[in-house]
Amino acid sequence: MKLLPIKIIILMAAVMANSACRSDVRPAIVPGVEVKNPEVEEAKNIPQKHSLGVIGEVEPIYFLPMKKPFLARIDTGAETSSIDVANRTIFERDGEQWVSFDLINREYGETHHFEKKVMRRQRVKRIDNKEKRIVVVMSVRFGGEIIRAQFSLAERDKFSYQGLIGRNILNGRAVVDTSLSNTLK
């Protein structure tokens, strides 16, 4: 039997010692094999904090500086919130597109004129057609929060509710229970 040189024995001992140490290397993702990360699993069990709590299918929203609320349909399927406006006119100010419009609260008769910078144009798919809408930033009070959010300017005069609250406002703020209405004041 031949004895291994001392250098080979030391090298083999070092390799074995390193392989026994804890490694921070994450295993590769193998299709069909689920690798659970304890940090991710723990985070899944932490309840989300929703500042508005559970809200219903219809809730009041205040478009600042207006004093009376608009009833708005809560729509988790809509990416961007929208509001019914009248007398919409697009104009240019300092080389940028702006829009002027009136917000008329059909229930209370309160009217306010706004001039807002056009943030973007959004393509909206409807059952019967596609349309492009102007999107502006509005300040609203929703529940106890003042929120600056994007709203598309729509013609909602045929709808029961002048406003529609989409995911851009709901995400992280509320859980929706469609069996409820008017939970916010």
Image (cartoon, rainbow, N blue to C red):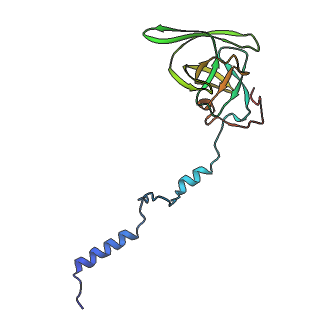
How many discs mark residues in the rendered view? Answer: 0
**Residue in the picture at 54% in, 57% down:** 38
In the figure, 141 relative to 27: above or below?
above
Res 133 → quadrant: top right
- Residue 17 in the image, given as x and y percentages of width and height: 36, 72
**Residue in the picture at 40% in, 70% down:** 20
Q: Is residue 100 left or right of residue 69?
A: left
Q: Quadrant of the N terminus?
A: bottom left
Q: Quadrant of the C terminus?
A: top right
**Residue in the picture at 30% in, 75% down:** 12
- Residue 141 in the image, given as x and y percentages of width and height: 66, 23
Of residue 14 and residue 167, the one placed in the foreground of this image is 167
Q: Is residue 63 left or right of residue 120?
A: right
Asked if residue 143 can be seen in this view, the reply is no
In the figure, 136 relative to 171: above or below?
above
In the figure, 179 relative to 7: above or below?
above
In the figure, 11 relative to 152: above or below?
below
Res 106 → quadrant: top right
Asked if residue 19 can be seen in this view, the reply is yes
- Residue 29 in the image, given as x and y percentages of width and height: 45, 57
- Residue 137 in the image, given as x and y percentages of width and height: 56, 20
Res 71 → quadrant: top right
Q: Residue furthest bottom?
A: 1
Of residue 144 and residue 85, the one placed in the foreground of this image is 85
Q: Is residue 30 left or right of residue 103?
A: left
